[in-house]
Amino acid sequence: MIRARSATRTLAASASALLVAVGCGASLPTSREAAATSTAEAVCGLLRDWSNEMAVSMNATSEALTDDDDPDTANQVLLDGWDDLIVLAEGHIAEAEALDLPVSAARDQLVEDITAGAEAAVVALEDERDHLEDLPPIEIDDQRGALGGAFTALEKAQSVVEPRIARYDDPELSAAVADEPTCEHVIQPA
C-alpha cells in the first residue's frame, strides 16, 4: 500500500513537472507563422529540386564533352545538353503554376513571381543557346572556357527564378526563409 501511494505521488509529481516545463517553454507557432514555415519549405524545396536537377544535367553534359575529347562533336554535345536544360526549365513553368501554398498575403504574388522567373529562365537559356551556337569548334584546350561560360550562364538563368523575399513585406515569411536550410542559395533575401 505504501509503495502504491509513493508511485502515485511520483507519477503525479512527474506529470506536474512536465506541465510546468511545457507551460514555460516556447509557444506554439501562430497560424501565420505555420503558414510561413510551410511556404518556405514548399518554395525552397521546389527551387532546390530545380537547382539540383539543372546541375545534374549540366554536369552530365560536361562529363560527356570532356570524356569524348572530340572537337568534331564537342559543340553538338554542348548544344544537346543545353537543349536538355531548356526542356527542364520549360517543365518548371508548369510546376510553378501548380504550386499550392498555404493561405497568406504573399501566396498569390509569390506563385506569380516564381512562374514569371521560370519563364524568364527559359528565355535566358534560349538566348544563351544562340551564343553557344556561335562558338568556334571546342578543342580540348578550349573545353574549360566553353564549359565555364556555360555553367556561368546556367547560374544566371537560375538566379532569375529566385524570389526576393523582402519584396513581400512579410516578417513571418522572412523569418521562415531565414530558418529553412533549403532556402540557402535559392532565395534572394533582399
Image: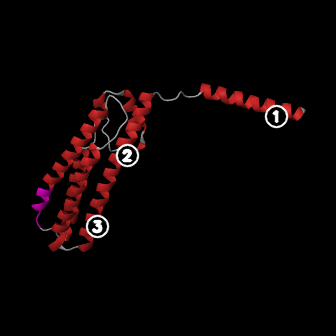
Q: Nearer the viewer, residue 75 or 44?
A: 44
- Residue 116's disc number: none
Dots 2 and 3: beta carbons under 8 Å?
A: no
Real-space CA distance between mark 2 and mark 1, rounded to the nearest whole angstrom: 48 Å
Mark 3, Cα crowd under 10 Å, few <14 / some 14-19 / many 20+, is: few
Secondary structure at numbered mark 2: helix
- Tell me if I can see residue 145 in this picture: no
Kindly identify the amino acid type of the residue bearing the numbered disc 1.
Ala
Give the residue pinned by disc 1: 7
Decide which of tag 2 and tag 3 comes sooner along the chain: 2
Give the residue pinned by disc 2: 45
Magenta residue span = 129-136
Give the image's coloring scheme. Answer: secondary structure
Decide which of tag 1 and tag 3 comes sooner along the chain: 1
- Residue 63's disc number: 3
Q: Is residue 92 above or below residue 139?
A: above
Residue 81 position, x and y percent, is: 22, 63
